[in-house]
Amino acid sequence: MAKKLALIASKGALDWAYPPFILASTAAALDYDVQIFFTFYGLTLLRKDISDLKVSPIANPAMPMPLPMPNLAQMIPGMESMATMMMKQKMAKKGIATIEELRSACLESGVKLIACQMTVDLFDFKPDDFIDGIEYGGAATFFEFAGESDVNMFI
């Protein structure tokens, strides 16, 4: 019987988008049965267009910057865009897959992507806003799978 991995993705920033998709695709490659429950801001990771994902240097003291930068400087207009551009360039240079590529790999390997119905309703999203191949469900849907899972993670 396959091991099971249940993930909750609750963040929609670029740097928070990588962990659920990397963990899920890796687990699927290791023959785990995997589900990711996307709730609140994590739900944006299921939208068709995610090219506008950003990484914020504010309140992210562990973010390696080329130069030491005080928090006050991180609040200057344009710093988020600059940090995002730098991160995307660094990832491309290192050959790291994009979020779109990782998301596709998850779908192709059978990872079940579940959009939180309550969050869909809360933010007035429509089914056309999202990629094909996802499912919709509530917390009970997550708990049904998570209750039988070997590994549960909140990201």
Image (spheres, rainbow, N blue to C red):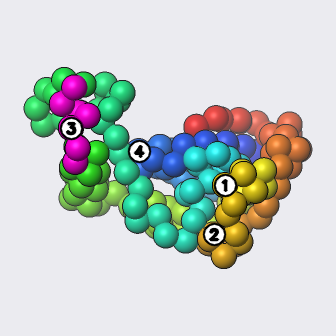
Closer to the camera, 78 or 13?
78
Give the number of the disc on residue 76.
3
The residue at 72%/57% (across/down) is 120
Badge 2 crowding class, 10 Å Cα cut-off, few under 14, some 14 to 19, many 20 or more, is: some
In this rendering, the answer to whether 26 lies above or below 98 is above
Nearest to the eye among marks 4 and 2: give it.
2
Question: Alpha-carbon distance for marks 4 and 1?
Answer: 22 Å
Residue holding disc 1: 123
- Can residue 30 be spotted in the picture? no
- Describe the element under mark 3 as helix, strand or loop: loop
Q: Amino acid at mark 1?
A: Phe
Nearest to the eye among marks 4 and 1: give it.
1
Badge 4 or badge 2: first in the primary sequence: 4
Question: Alpha-carbon distance for marks 3 and 4?
Answer: 20 Å
The residue at 64%/35% (across/down) is 154
Badge 3 or badge 4: first in the primary sequence: 4
> What is the span of residues highlighted in magenta in the rendered image?
72-78
Residue holding disc 2: 130
- Contact between labelled residues 2 and 3, with CB atoms less than 8 Å apart: no
Badge 2 or badge 1: first in the primary sequence: 1
Residue holding disc 4: 15
Badge 1 crowding class, 10 Å Cα cut-off, few under 14, some 14 to 19, many 20 or more, is: few
Badge 4 crowding class, 10 Å Cα cut-off, few under 14, some 14 to 19, many 20 or more, is: some
Q: Give the x, y percent position of residue 136.
A: 79, 61
* 62 falls in the magenta region: no
